[in-house]
Image (cartoon, rainbow, N blue to C red):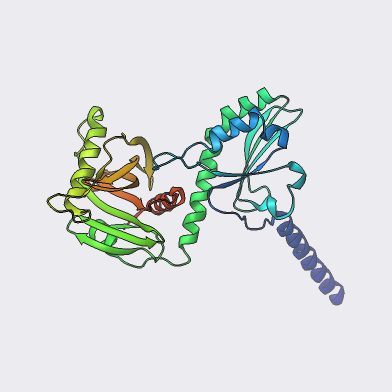
Amino acid sequence: MKQFRTLLIVLFIISITSCKDVSQQQNYRPSSIGPLNSITLVIDNELWKGKVGDKIREHFAGPAVGLTWNEPLFTINPIPSQVFSGSVRNSRSILYVQKDSVDVAHIKTDMYARPQKVGIVKGTTDEEIIRNIDAKAAEMIAAFKEIELKEEQQRFLRSLNKETILQEKFGIILNMPSAYKVSKQEDNFVWIDREILKGNMNIIVYEMPGNYFKSDSTLVKDIIRMRDSIGQKYIPGPDVPNKTTYMRTEQAFSPYISSTEVSSISAVEVRGIWDIKNYPMAGPFITYIINDKERNRKLVIEGFTFAPATDKRDFMFQLEAIIKTLRFQE
């Protein structure tokens, strides 16, 4: 009888373990793969070459905002549905567009891999598909961008910058690769940069009084005035005889401004072009003005790139990803 009880217990444990193993296998998803800011587009050639393809390019490969020349929001890699198998299904961002008997558009999470977003668009006609793309493109773009940002931020963790100057001066922490180094610091200003093949990538941090921006009607002018005054004070350009050089907001183009959140705090996002007064240098910038009411200040964190004759989308994307790791020191 004692042996029989022991046998029952062993069988019970084996049964539970087996169920657990089966459950784990069913829930298993491989790690997603793919270059940053890239979408695997599953679409038949006929749709891709026609007006459906034009609509997809309009939304998903339209020009990224605030760059010195047109670069696509995402790099699109189209493949026919017949070859959508194997490791291709593990792409991090997938857009699946198909003519079908149903009229739907939605986003799936972790269908084939983790982390993963899959945008699915179907329709019985080209017109239905196009209507669904128009209706869901903004939501899908936001989902793809979020997962790409998280992937970029995850890559930072391989080798993080350990300098503590931002904690000491501003009470904040940013995750950034160890290639970034502090190059300049003043009472209310820190400049961090890294060298790249044809230039450099930069992050600057400073703060303004909590009541610095008086009115929404003058917001754009006030932001430009703020940036230009900081540039004149802290970011000189190359030496030019009998001329003053410094970084400023490019005068020919008004920056793009939108509301957002950083670290769950309301903020303003500014994208535009910087140049050097009296010297032929320019590049894109992205600025976040964070409304830090708890400390009665506007915390300003900006990323800008100098990389002549080089695409800059992915450089600016990395700077955005760094800024969005912001945490306040407790």
Residue at 34% from the left image edge and 35% from the top image edge: 257
Farthest residue to the left: give it.
Answer: 242
Asked if residue 263 is positioned above or below residue 268 in the image, the reply reads: below
Q: Determine if residue 42 is in view.
A: yes
Asked if residue 134 is positioned above or below residue 324 in the image, the reply reads: above
Residue at 86% from the left image edge and 76% from the top image edge: 3
Q: Is the N terminus in the top left, top right, bottom left or bottom right quadrant? A: bottom right
Quadrant location of residue 102? top right
Residue at 28% from the left image edge and 45% from the top image edge: 275
**Residue 243 percent across, percent down from the top left:** 14, 49
**Residue 109 percent across, percent down from the top left:** 62, 45
238 or 82, nearer to the observer: 238
Residue at 61% from the left image edge and 24% from the top image edge: 131
Q: Determine if residue 330 is in view.
A: no
Asked if residue 158 is positioned above or below residue 170 in the image, the reply reads: below
Q: Is the C terminus in the top left, top right, bottom left or bottom right quadrant? A: bottom left
117 or 99, nearer to the observer: 99
68 or 285, nearer to the observer: 68
Q: Is residue 215 left or right of residue 30?
A: left
**Residue 325 percent across, percent down from the top left:** 40, 54
204 or 3, nearer to the observer: 204
